Amino acid sequence: MSKLFKKGADPNTEMSFLDHLEALRWHLVRSAVVILSLAVFAFIRKDILFDGIIFALRRPDFPTYRVLCRLSEKYGLDICISDFSFDLISINLSGQFTTHMFAAFIAGLIAGMPYLLWEIWRFVKPALSAKEKKFSRGIVFFTSFLFVTGVLFGYFIISPMSINFLGTYQVSSLVTNQINLNSYISTITILTLASGVIFELPMVVYFLSKLGVITPAFMRQYRKHSMVVILIIAALITPSPDVTSQMLVALPLFLLYEISIFISAAVVKKELKSV
């Protein structure tokens, strides 16, 4: 990597460690302002945040449930979700307010993630050589795209199945499910954010391949092992014993792994050509 320099300064003058920290601080400050602004907007529009997004997972007309019921009717599968027999409660005096703040912050973080990635890229970009900048072109777009795709996958696929199964599961008919509001929202946010992070796998593989840490041969060699790991992850994310639900989660992860192999191979091939 090339050296980092002060903006507008002599290109031969290298930035000190404190200068790096100062530059990073302002990138993070701007990112925090954007994320907090979006969080405040989400806090104010709680009707959209809760009734329109978070609690929509409990309604029978949620798009995922309608698609699953249609597939169930058409192909004779037992994947139609129509039982929403659990109540949400708040058992702490400040429970609803603190949950409101937490949900608004997560919404602001998700919405502001592309801007945060852009600010990080602006901090790192001056340290890259012309060749490294060329290879990194479009990184903010693709990283943001993968993250948003993962978030949507977590919200529309993983969360509905997990919430429905866990919320309606009973060890006995004598036990009524009354789910704590904080537990409900924490589950949704964790699953959604985790899915967004997992979908960054192709970008992680891209950089690890450029650093020579992994190769396509290595990934192909351990493809069977990765399949086992993915199936375990799918089983943990979707606690429903239904195999169909687990495969709905596992198949996109398999696809991500194969795409990552293709990306790694392309990176290695390009590196060999440049030698």
Image (cartoon, helix red, strand yellow):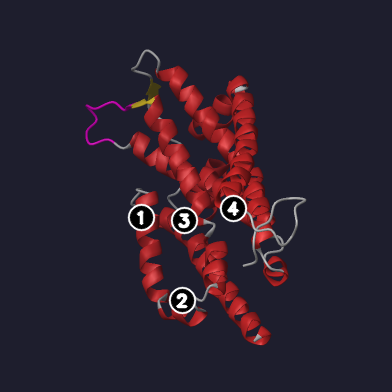
Q: Which residue is mark 3?
A: 249
Residue in front for this viewpoint, 3 or 234: 3
Q: Which residue is mark 4?
A: 16
At x 67% / y 55%, what residue is drawn? 140
Magenta stretch, main secondary structure class: loop
Neighbour class for label 4 at 10 Å: few (<14), some, many (≥20)?
Answer: few
Q: Which residue is mark 2?
A: 219
Q: Residue furthest right?
A: 8
Q: Earlier in the sequence, mark 3 or mark 1?
A: 1
Estimate the spatial distance between the alpha carbons at disc 3 and disc 1, rounded to whole Å: 9 Å
The local secondary structure at tag 3 comes to helix
Q: Which region shows up in magenta?
A: 170-178
Query: How far from the left and from the top, in percent, is residue 202?
Result: 56, 64
At x 22% / y 33%, what residue is drawn? 172
The local secondary structure at tag 4 comes to loop
Please name the amino acid that badge 2 sits on.
Answer: Met
At x 46% / y 42%, what residue is drawn? 159
Estimate the spatial distance between the alpha carbons at disc 2 and disc 4, rounded to whole Å: 39 Å
Neighbour class for label 3 at 10 Å: few (<14), some, many (≥20)?
Answer: many
The local secondary structure at tag 2 comes to helix
Q: Can residue 112 be spotted in the picture?
A: yes
Where is the N terminus found, in terms of image quarters? bottom right
Q: Which residue is mark 1?
A: 235
Estimate the spatial distance between the alpha carbons at disc 2 and disc 1, rounded to whole Å: 22 Å
Please name the amino acid that badge 1 sits on.
Answer: Ala
